[in-house]
Amino acid sequence: MNLETVKLAAENNLWSAIVPELMLGCIALLLLVLEMVLPKKHRVAIADVATAGVFGTLLGVVLNWNVGLNGVETFNGLILHSESGQLMRVFFLLSALMVCLLGRVALARQAMPKVEFYHIVLVVTAAMMLLAQSNHFLMLFVALETLTIGLYILVGYFRTSTASLEASLKYLVMGALSSGLLLFGIVLLYGVGGNAALSAHTANSMHYGELGHFLAANPHNFLASLGVVLVLSGVAFKIGAFPFQIWVPDVYQGAPTPVTAFLAVASKAAGFAVLIGLCGPGGVFAAYNWLTTPVLTVIAAATIIFGNIAALTQHNVKRMIGLSGVSHAGFLLLGVVAAPVAPLALGAIYFYLFAYLLASFSVFGVMVHVAGPDDSDQELDHYAGLAKDSPFLATVLAVGLGSLAGIPPLAGFMGKLLIFIAAYQSGARWLLLIAAAGVVVSIYYYFGWIKAAFFESWAARPEAAGTRPARTPVGAVTGVALGALALASVVLGFYQGPIGAWFTR
Amino acid sequence: MSNLPFDPLLVSIAAPLALALLIALGLPKRWSLMLSYLAFAIPLLLGLHTWWHFSAVPQNQGYAFLTQYETGLGGLGIGLKLGLNGISMPLFAMAGIVGFAAGLYAIQSGAERLKIYLMLLLIMQGGLMGVFASVDVFFLYFFHELALIPTFIMVGVWGGRDRSYAAMKMTIYLTAGAMISLVGLIALYVQSGANSFDLIELKRHLAAQPLAVSVQQNIFGLLLLGFGVLVSLWPFHTWAPLGYGAAPSSNAMLHAGVLKKFGLYGLIQVALPLLPEGMGHWAHPLAWLAVVGNILVVGLITIAQRDLKQMIGYSSVMHMGYAFLGLAAASVLGIGGVVLMMVAHGLSVALMFLLATSVHHRTQTFAMDEMGGLAAKAPVLAAFFVAATFASIGLPGFANFWGELTIFVALWKFSPLITVLAIAGVIISAVYGLRAVASVFFGPASQRMNEVAQAHPPTDLRWAERVPALILLVALLFVGLWPKSLSDPINGALAPKTQTAAR
């Protein structure tokens, strides 16, 4: 390959379209350089650089919201730019921003190298952003592997903690399995799509559009069905849906809390972005809705039931939030099931994801402040008397948990309402009843947590107060961020303004 | 015209919520207390204002004071639409009155962390005003939940015996009821095809294209079950006595008095007019559940109670049975009676909870066996308590009488047998009411009572307690002596509605 070919390839690709991702990559590299050149006492500033970099990128994406690329494919069809892609970029950048902020609090308690944490978070975020915009199975797989490998490292980041290492190993084994399933599914689809004996066969059968055409022309091909189910299994692992949820409690407990938050929010949302691209209206598998809808319906029902019932008995808040996250995946799947039929469903899923982001990071934000040096040891009892000692954290926690539980006037309720309306429109009524029952069950454990933080009777247990780890005071920047999250959760519950109009178009 | 330069409904919702926000942001305690008087007085004054001017104000599509505010979900037909019709106006005014009384009682109560207590009570008050002012079904539900959240916290933090268990049980029961009714409302929204949560729009749409009878019956069943749990329909009532028994007084006043009426209100305002075929299908099972379960079984359980607050809690469950019977009769008379009774019961049960707490201050117990002879030491308290008991039993002169009377008259047409059984319930409530009066205030003082009296000599009702009690009592007497002031607007709202039901 000579220089001319490289130049030609570079010119044909619209690099300006992926500036946000490139920026994150450059900042990630800059962090490593800074660690080498900065004197040791100034290295604490690296976290500031990372946070500011993510914030700047976020600002850039929001300010350049409409760059006129919607519906345009770039990089030879690897990437499709769309409004929902922009939305997910904002989503992942917001998540990364919060993870950086929480990381500062959590890492301060550990004797650990800190730069790599931010470096990997930025790279993983860029991968998620590309994943949400991918329009080709090659892009999908590369982005997915980039983010998964980054997360393997992050989950095991507290390398002196056996819980963290165990979590990392479990995540690695399960992740490798799911990647294998996904890859097998992709290969089957690729192979059958290129079969010259079938109508509408294509040489480029990893491209979403081409494959979608092929599947529409062969809506009942057995090999293709198998491929579809295997790809869905791979994605189900990412979102923690039944029966691929088994890794969730252990990994969530063992991972450093900011990474748990990253897994719970961003990684899950990435899975849903992929799922919408595959099974949503006009998605690749649209012709296989006869197969995907029943499969996803069963998965959704089982996920809601499992997540809620398993969370009931947890005393470790990280396990509890992990399992409650499983049930949230179930509620979101309800939206995906409804999506091919109900026009409201897509907006509902996106709204739900944002409400979930606000609420989850509120809760995780409180968790990093309450946690002690052993990050996996976060029990409900540690929250005793939080309302008295730190009313601010207790309020943020209550708002976050209330929003997760779906109690009005919080944003989580609006998300659930929109999803439920979409589900009813699509005719998935039994699933809706299961989901409604799931909400009632979930009240028990969310309420138990609020109870632990607020009600006096729990604080009266002196042995619990003596053994709980010391809490970290809230810093100014983190405090503002947490306050903003809680405020947004409250306001979005009753006043959605132009945002609401956008989500319910 | 109402002659106010602002929207009275929006202000009555926003004023308590705004003060609650200020307190949350760290308003000093002295200012919080001072402003609380104002924030509880505004809903009261505006409630009375709307009552007074209701007949004179021009009505728009059946609603007075109609206004609409966009919140960003106009595409789904959700918007903050406020207005009062003849059914919601009496309850709106009642919410203002009971809220003011509960607020006054809370301010003087000297509860621990009074600021936060008041903040939660103010949130509740704002939510309650919103429930009855909303014309949009989404916000109807929304405000109900908003008012519900403080209940859980107040029971859990300031509650009495078993507060933790009571708070959890209430939360789960009420969430279950709310979720079932939410599913019913979503079903109504989607099935109607009106693409709107606006009651006026839904009504217009469904009048033009009514739903199939079986669909109406199914949705009505969901709403009846969901709202029924919220109103403590037997056998889903067990949360109520437990919760009220544990709840701090002002919270119990607002919840038992006002918030619990939401379920009935939803049935009357949403389910009956929009699903006219539904009630007929469920009337008989509902009536039997109400008369056997709520009135007779719970009535007998009430007689067996030896705890004053538990007794009031059970009696409120029992009285809801009459309301369900009025609904089952499904005539203008019956439903009008239910609305009157909701107002009357709201005032009287709030008064009972207030007085029960005042009794507790003087006896240090709720166990009726350990009281006695209090009338000699606190004659004014005794007089109030006797009056409240008479109101609650339904003696003429008090508002409750008219509500129960009209329900019984309407019920006779529906089923004479059930009517006879229901009237037997009145005897039950006379038994437990009078027994409570006797064992608390008259007869010889118990051993324990004498010990308590020596330690803290009981005083009579203080003015800070008398004023809220007096407000409630005057309202009860006013409606009792001049029921027309409420029944006219109620009939005005109901008459066209039941014609469509009869068609």
Image: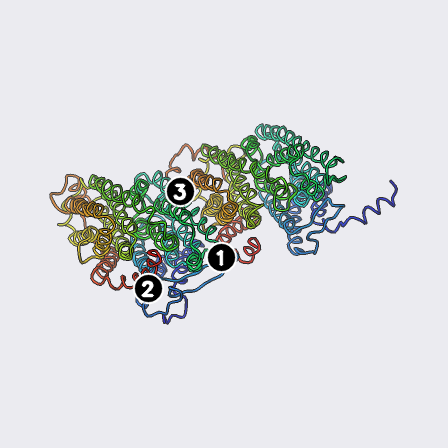
Q: Earlier in the sequence, mark 2 or mark 1?
A: 2
- Distance between mark 1 and mark 3 Cα atoms: 25 Å
Give above or below for A268 relative to B36: above
Q: Position of residue B188 (x, y in %)?
A: 44, 50
| Residue B45 image label | 2
**Badge 1 local density, few (<14 within 10 Å), some, or many (20+)?**
some
Q: Nearer the viewer, residue B460 or A186?
A: A186
Q: Which residue is mark 3?
A: B176
Chain for numbered disc 3 = B
Which SS class for mark 3? Answer: helix
- Distance between mark 3 and mark 2 Cα atoms: 35 Å
Q: Position of residue A67 (x, y in %)?
A: 69, 56
Q: Amino acid at mark 3?
A: Ala
Instruction: Kindly check if marks 2 and 1 are in contact, taking CB atoms under 8 A apart as contact.
Output: no
Q: Which residue is mark 1?
A: B77
- Distance between mark 2 and mark 1 Cα atoms: 32 Å
Q: Amino acid at mark 1?
A: Gly
Quarter-wise, where is residue B369 in the image? top left
Q: Amino acid at mark 2?
A: Leu
Q: Is residue A268 left or right of residue B47?
A: right
Instruction: Kindly check if marks 3 and 2 are in contact, taking CB atoms under 8 A apart as contact.
Output: no
Give above or below for A182 relative to B6: above
Q: Position of residue A222 (x, y in %)?
A: 65, 32
Give above or below for B16 relative to B418: below
Q: Nearer the viewer, residue A358 or B184?
A: B184
Q: Position of residue B163 (x, y in %)?
A: 33, 40
Q: Comparing marks 1 and 3, which lies closer to the viewer?
A: 1
**What is the quadrant of the C terminus of chain A in the image?**
bottom right
Quarter-wise, where is residue A261 in the image? top right
Q: Earlier in the sequence, mark 1 or mark 3?
A: 1
